[in-house]
């Protein structure tokens, strides 16, 4: 299976918005382990069922989770494809920073211009 790694600017915005809240990160973490109903998820939070539903909706809009109906329940599971795409984006950012740090290290390792040996012109009469 080929996984598309490029995210549009709108997708990037939705992913980072979805991950900006601890509750949503926790819901994502819990649904990576196993599929759970929204009711089951809501039991562990000190907030209303409706508030948990809103968190789930934000994660679903970012496509970090997938929700499906089974009878009257709504089951939620993490979407490994979108998680992989977000991870690939973060890896590219990490590569950029590592390259910048490496260039900075190279600049700092160069001896100052005054310490560099000068090529002296041969003296007259030598």
Image: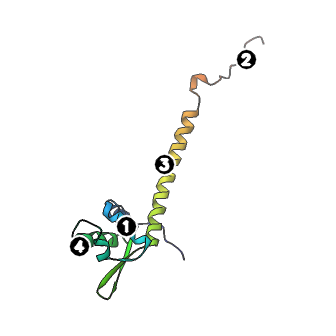
Q: CA distance from mark 1 to mark 4?
A: 26 Å
Tell me which label, 1 or 2, sits earlier in the chain. 1
Q: Earlier in the sequence, mark 2 or mark 3?
A: 3
Query: Residue reaching furthest front?
Result: 43
- Per the image, the residue denoted by label 1 is 11
Q: Which mark is residue 97?
A: 3
Q: Are marks 3 and 4 in contact (CB under 8 Å)?
A: no
- Which residue is found at the position 32% from the left and 59% from the top? 20
- The residue wearing badge 2 is 122
Q: Nearer the viewer, residue 55 or 103?
A: 55
Mark 1 nearby-residue class (10 Å; few <14, some 14–19, many ≥20): some
Going from N to C along the chain, the mark reached first, 2 or 4, is 4
Label 1: which secondary element = helix
Whether residue 75 sits left or right of residue 112 in the image: it is left
The residue shown at (58%, 33%) is: 109
Determine whether label 1 and label 4 are within 8 Å by CB: no
In front: label 2 or label 4: 4
Residue 7 spot, x, y in % from top left: 42, 66
SS for dot 2: loop
Nearer the observer: mark 1 or 4; the answer is 4
Q: CA distance from mark 1 to mark 3?
A: 22 Å
Graded by Cα atoms within 10 Å as few (under 14), some (14 to 19) or many (20 or more), the crowding at tag 4 reads some
Residue visible at 46% across and 72% down in the picture: 81
């Amino acid at each position: 299976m080929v996984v598309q790694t490029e995210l549009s600017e709108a997708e990037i915005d939705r992913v980072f918005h979805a991950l900006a809240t601890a509750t949503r990160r926790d819901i994502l973490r819990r649904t990576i382990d196993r599929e759970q109903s929204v009711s089951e998820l809501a039991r562990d939070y000190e907030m209303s069922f409706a508030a948990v539903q809103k968190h789930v909706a934000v994660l679903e809009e970012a496509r970090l989770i997938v929700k499906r109906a089974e009878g009257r329940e709504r089951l939620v599971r993490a979407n490994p494809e979108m998680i992989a795409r977000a991870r690939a984006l973060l890896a590219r950012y990490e590569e950029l920073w590592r390259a910048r740090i490496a260039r900075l290290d190279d600049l700092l390792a160069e001896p100052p211009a005054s310490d560099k040996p000068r090529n002296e012109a041969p003296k007259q009469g030598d």
